[in-house]
Every structure is written in structure tokens, then in C-alpha cells.
Amino acid sequence: MTDRLRDYRDKRDFAATPEPAGGDSAAAELARFVVQQHHATNLHWDLRLEREGTLASWAVPRGIPFHPKEDRLAVRTEDHPLKYLEFEGEIPAGNYGAGTMTVWDSGTYELEKWRDDEVIVVFHGARVEGRYVLFKTKGKNWMIHRMDPPAAGVEPMPERIEPMKAKLGPLPSDDGAFAYEVKWDGIRAVARLDRGHLDLTGRNGTDYRPRYPELRPLGGALGSTRAILDGEIVAFDEHGKPSFERLQSRMHLTGDAQVKRRAKELPVTYVAFDLLWLDGHLTTGLPYRDRRRLLADLELDGPHWRSPAHHEGDGAALLEATREQGLEGIVAKRLESPYEPGRRSGAWIKVKNVLRQEIVIGGWARGEGKRSGSFGALCAGVHDDEGRLRYVGKVGTGFDEKMLALLTRELTSRRRDSSPFEGRQPPRGTIFVEPELVAEVELREWTRTGTLRAPAFKGLRDDVDPTMVVRESVD
């Protein structure tokens, strides 16, 4: 035993850590196992199997899989003493494995095969039940795979769920059938929380993890609970109001140093407002009321994430409150409605205090005077019912110097000879570009001829597929 625990002892100072130095635990007739949740530098789980007087150990970064389609990496670590079967505690900073360790599951197991490159066991625990194999890959690492079918109703975590969309409209007449939320004026993002790992994906599939490093700890916020959330990435101003303009300064950074610096200067918050999948079960078919209750039970409240309350009924009062605070508006959501991935559904209604519209930039007019070095106005378009890009007017206000410089670079690199618009065309002299950039504008109204009246630029939307941009109108 001494030789098998040498690596374990060499890595630890037992005068500084509460971990056991060795020794036996109480004798047992059946081989035992333990799974410990370890909040170290990165949240992970440690699987330990009693074997010939010690605990053979693997670090499992994403936890024990419960579905045969979800294999997990398992990193073989040094053997541990049997007393580790019951160890819980805080390993002090500066020590190997520093962090909090708790017993997540324990029990006995039946051994079917033990080779240097493959171990097959049947677990009998409170959480982990069934037949599993640990097998060595071509490199040094191992994988753990569930060999039994999943428990009834358990599904693998979906790789992607497309966000549900809302329609523009007035307050619903059947007020009591709806709940109401603040419209957050951020970037829509679906968050997959998978035992310490976070995937954060925009509407068009953009990976937002590199841009918003302060949100990465959200992956471990629920511990072993796995979930898929729908929400928005929001930048709040000094008064605590969501500001799309402030978010713009975070959206277009690419260098790691810039991203880290701005994350400290202007941190964002993930605002979760729906729950799409939870611990092996798709929740999209549940009524909104039930999804919201399950979301509240998760108690998501961290330094850069939250799940604000919703209000059942009395939408007019919330709309008036948002108007007084200068917010964009609210979203009404039918209490008994399911979540409809990818669909613009009448079960969700955007009720706005100010009119906003996404537009595709199809060209630009030359600037004059102080703007002679950039552009004077953007030529805006939206798609009609047949997918054709239609010209809807020019946008010439709302740009600061940084945005002027950014847009000038982006537009120059997308120049083309012909117009991307069909039908009515912009004024003569327009410089056309590939219709790849999406912007959001605020406007007074639409004219009868389908032109934006008094539009002002609010920001670029790199989370929106330009081919999906259509005119928003009240049905």
C-alpha cells in the first residue's frame, strides 16, 4: 500500500491540509465507490473505486454521464487512501487540489472486468446506478461510458435549441392569461450549463464565450445540475438600466487583452428568462408558467447572472413603469403556452414604448463636411414575404466616432458593383455593399410608402442572420 500511495503523499503537506494521510476505513463486504464534487480551480467530479486496499481515482470534468450518447472524459489520477471514501472538507489555498470537496454519491459496485486499459463495473449508488465502462484512449486519457440504457424519460442534452421569437403587438385584451417581463435590450443567447462548462450561443449560432469571459463561471453555478437557459446578455448603465449602446463597446472586440480589459471596465450580465432543458428532460413542452417555476427553483443569482421576476397580469402597469424609466418596453407571454423553438409566435408579444427595427445595410451614401472621410448615411433594407431585399430608406444619425470608423472599415471591405435591393432603389451615387451587416434603428414610424421615418442608428446586430430580417409590424 505504501508504494501505491507514494504519489498521493508526495503531492500533499498533511500539516496544511485536512486530507487523510492514509489508513484503512471500516471493512466492507462489497467493493465501494465514491463520487466527490470538487470545487477546485475548475469544478469537476472525482470518481474513486475501492481496489486492493486503495481507491483507484479518475477526475471527471463534466461528471458521470446518465445517457449512453454522452461519453465523458475521465483523467486517471493518483490512487487515494480508503479514508477518502468519506472525506469532505476545504483544502486550503496553496495546496494541491485546493478547494471545497463534498461527497456527491457513494455506494457499492460489482466488478466485471479490470484491465490496465479497461474497467467495467455495475454501480449501486443513490445517484449513479447501472453498468459503466472506463476505457483508455490512444493517448493518456480515459473515457467513461454508460453501457445500460438511460432511465425512463432521460434524454441527452441537445446541442442546440433555436430561440423562440416574439411578435410585435399591443397589450393583449385577455390580460390575466399572460405574464409580463421587461424587454431587456441586449443580445439574445441560449446558455448550456453542463457541470462546470458553459456554451453560450447567439441566434445565428455565434459562440459568445470568448467575448464575455465574466460569464464563464455561470457554467458551474448549478453544480451537478445541468440546464439549458434562454436569456439575454445585457450591459447596464450607471443607473441600472439596460443599455444597448454600452453593449456595443463589447460586441466587436476580438483581441484577448481588449476583451479582458473591457470585461473589468464594463461587465455584462446574463439575464435568464426561460428554461428549455433540465437534468435529462426537455421542458419546452411545458406551459410557460411551469417553466418559470422550475427556473425560479434554480435560484440563479450570481455576480454576472440573474433571473428577474415576471408579473402575472396587470401588463399596463408594468408597461407604464418601463415608460417612466425610459425602457424599451415589455414582453407579454401566455401562461399556458409551450416554448416553440425558432418560431415567431403570437404566444409572445413585444409591446414597445419606442419603435425599433432591425435593418440590413445594403449600401451607403458619401459623407460631406466632417463626415467626408467616412459615410453620410446607411442605405437600409428589409426582406419581403418572398425573401427579396427591399430598400426602406437612409439612416444618417446616431453614430459616434468609434462606430463611424468601424462601419467605414466594414463597409469598405464589402463593396460590390450592383445593388442588392430589388424594386425601388436608393438615390443615384449610392455605393453598394454585400448585404451582410445588420443594424438596429429607432424610428418615429413607418410611412405609407414603407419608408423609415426619422430613423436613428442604435448599434450593429452580429447576432442576427441578415436573411431573416423582415419588417416588424402589428398583426
Image (cartoon, grey):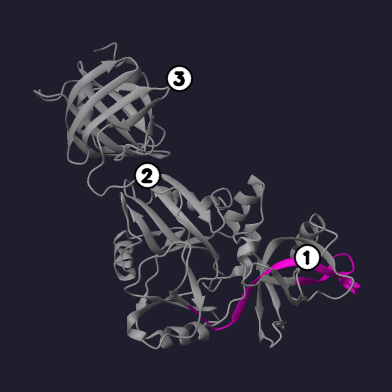
User: Where residue 458 sits: x, y (%)?
Assistant: 66, 72
Image quadrant occupied by the N terminus? top left
User: Where residue 152 sits: x, y (%)?
Assistant: 22, 47
Q: Residue visible at 26% across and 41% down?
A: 150
Which of the two discs, 2 and 1, labels the residue nearer the N terminus? 2
Residue 269: mark: none
Which of the two discs, 2 and 3, labels the residue nearer the N terminus? 3
Q: Residue visible at 37% across and 60% down?
A: 275
Residue 404: mark: 1
Which of the two discs, 1 and 3, labels the residue nearer the N terminus? 3
Q: Disc 1 residue type?
A: Leu
Magenta: main secondary structure equals strand
Q: Which residue is mark 2?
A: 195
In space, the residues marked 2 and 1 are separated at their CA atoms by 42 Å
Classify 10 Å Cα crowding around label 3: few (below 14), some (14-19), many (20 and above). few
Q: Disc 3 residue type?
A: Lys
Residue 370 lies in the magenta stretch: yes
User: Where residue 424 sits: x, y (%)?
Assistant: 78, 76
SS type, badge 1: helix
Q: Is residue 115 left or right of residue 473?
A: left
Extreme residue in the top direction: 3
Viewer-side label of 2, 3:
3
Residue 138: mark: 3
SS type, badge 3: loop
Q: Which residues are magenta?
A: 350-379
Q: Give residue 175's quadrant in the image.
A: bottom left
Q: Is residue 464 left or right of residue 119?
A: right
